[in-house]
């Protein structure tokens, strides 16, 4: 069910529970700013999620309210994970869904990293 990305942060969201290790996840990478783990329902050969450690509902919330340090740390972590997974050649896709039109389901910012195979068109066309 897509979420309302304008709502305040909910500490009971599933990715907050993953960060607190209340729910298991398959860890890919972790540093001061970010945690990366395998998506439970992969949509490509490689499907990794990277989330900031801070309490941000969405890319919109993060880009508006996070500190420069948090933003730099998070963006670097996304790039690091893709490089560590060997996805830079022949390429990968990084995607953040924001709100109902994009189908965002979990109200904690996450960047999807897709790769390992040709990924098809960038967006569904009517
Ligand atoms: P969204 O639609 O919000 O952009 O993407 C949410 C993603 O989180 C989906 O790809 C979904 O498979 C993944 N996901 C949802 N719940 C869990 C979970 O408990 N563990 C993991 N590893 N991924 C999850």
Image (cartoon, helix red, strand yellow):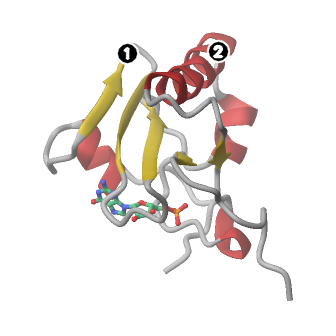
Q: Residue at x 16, y 51 (%)?
A: 23
- In the picture, the disc for residue 31 is 1
Please rate how many residues cluster around mark 2, counting C-alpha atoms within 10 Å: few if below 14, some from 14 to 19, many from 20: few
Q: Is residue 59 above or below residue 2?
A: above
Q: Which residue is mark 2?
A: 72
Q: Nearer the viewer, residue 88 or 21?
A: 88
Residue contact at pointers 1 and 2, CB within 8 angstroms: no
Q: Nearer the viewer, residue 69 or 95?
A: 95
Question: Is label 2 in a helix, a strand or a loop?
Answer: helix
- In the picture, the disc for residue 59 is none
Please rate how many residues cluster around mark 1, counting C-alpha atoms within 10 Å: few if below 14, some from 14 to 19, many from 20: few
Ligand 1 image position (quadrant): bottom left
Total numbered badges shown on the rendered structure = 2
Q: In which quadrant is the C terminus drawn?
A: bottom right
**Left or right for 98, reference 54:** right
Q: Is residue 90 above or below residue 97?
A: above
Report x, y in % for residue 71.
64, 21
Q: Residue at x 32, y 45 (%)?
A: 16
**Left or right for 37, reference 23:** right
Question: Is label 1 in a helix, a strand or a loop?
Answer: loop
Q: Dividing the picture into quarters, in which one does residue 32 lie?
A: top left
Q: Dividing the picture into quarters, in which one does residue 78 lie?
A: top right
- Real-space CA distance between mark 1 and mark 2, rounded to the nearest whole angstrom: 12 Å
Q: Is residue 66 above or below residue 40?
A: above
């Amino acid at each position: 069910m897509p979420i309302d990305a304008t709502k305040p942060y909910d500490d009971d969201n599933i990715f907050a529970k993953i960060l607190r290790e209340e729910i298991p996840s398959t860890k890919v990478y972790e540093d001061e700013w970010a945690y990366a783990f395998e998506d439970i329902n992969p949509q490509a050969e490689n499907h990794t999620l990277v989330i900031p450690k801070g309490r941000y509902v969405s890319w919109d919330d993060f880009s508006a309210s996070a500190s420069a340090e948090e933003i730099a740390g998070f963006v670097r972590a996304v790039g690091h994970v893709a490089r560590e997974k060997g996805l830079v050649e022949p390429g990968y896709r990084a995607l953040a869904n924001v709100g109902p039109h994009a189908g965002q389901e979990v109200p904690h910012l996450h960047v999807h990293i897709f790769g390992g195979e040709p990924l098809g068109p960038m967006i569904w066309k009517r």
